[in-house]
Image: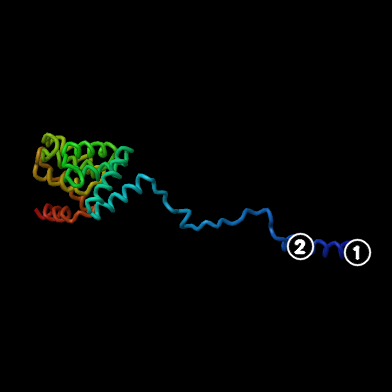
Amino acid sequence: MKKVSIFVAPLILVSLATACSKPATDSAPASTASPAAAAAPVVSEKDKNYQEALRLIEANGPADVANAVNLLLKGSDEGHAASKVELAKLYRAGNGVEKNGGEAANLFRAAAQDGSADAAYYLAEMYAAGEGVEKNEGEALNMYLQAGQAGSADAAFKLGEIYQDGKGVAANLGEAKAWFQKAADAGNTQAAEKLKALDAQ
């Protein structure tokens, strides 16, 4: 029995040492993709065209704006809400296209239905002023509310003013403060000043 134990133990150790030193051939190869590449966001063709349109509008050359209009028209036709908003702004201003308030309002309305807070705010402005649409303060208020609830700081500030002054609604300082606070939280400095003034009363 002693002889067996003397020779078996070394064999076991040798076997274990060989197994440990043998390179693993069945393990999956390590990924060579960098973390940055793996986490890179996918940018759609619509978003690329939209960003290029913004760049062209910023360049502000006649050919640049014309090309921007074409890109925004394509994006708008494909249902890209941000493209609708920028195209509407061009129609509203008559920049690169013939000025057309009605077309601007239609595009803003379509983008607002897609959830754009900016579109709802701009459309509210147009209803309030009767620009491109029949003046309608009630519809303006509805659109300001939609925009404010969707996160527009400008709309929240405007709603604060509306409720503070009682424009088309009963004056309500509590509601005014709530909207001014929402606007201030979003970085609107005018709203912060309004809140200070109201608190000082």
Q: Is residue 178 visible?
A: no
Which SS class for mark 1? helix
Going from N to C along the chain, the mark reached first, 1 or 2, is: 1
Q: Closer to the camera: disc 1 or disc 2?
A: 2
For mark 1, does the 10 Å Cα neighbourhood hold few (<14), some (14 to 19), or many (20 or more) residues?
few
Point out residue 127 in the picture as x, y percentages from the top left corner. 14, 38
**Number of numbered discs:** 2
Residue 18 numbered tag? 2
Residue 39 numbered tag? none
| Residue beneath the point at 21% across and 49% down | 153
| Residue beneath the point at 87% across and 65% down | 6
On the rendered structure, is 181 left or right of 41?
left
| Residue beneath the point at 65% across and 54% down | 27
Point out residue 111 in the picture as x, y percentages from the top left corner. 26, 39
For mark 2, does the 10 Å Cα neighbourhood hold few (<14), some (14 to 19), or many (20 or more) residues?
few
Relative vertical location of residue 8 with respect to residue 170 in this rendering, above or below:
below
Point out residue 38 in the picture as x, y percentages from the top left corner. 48, 53
Residue 3 numbered tag? 1
Q: Amino acid at mark 2?
A: Thr
Compute the Cα span from label 1 to label 2: 23 Å
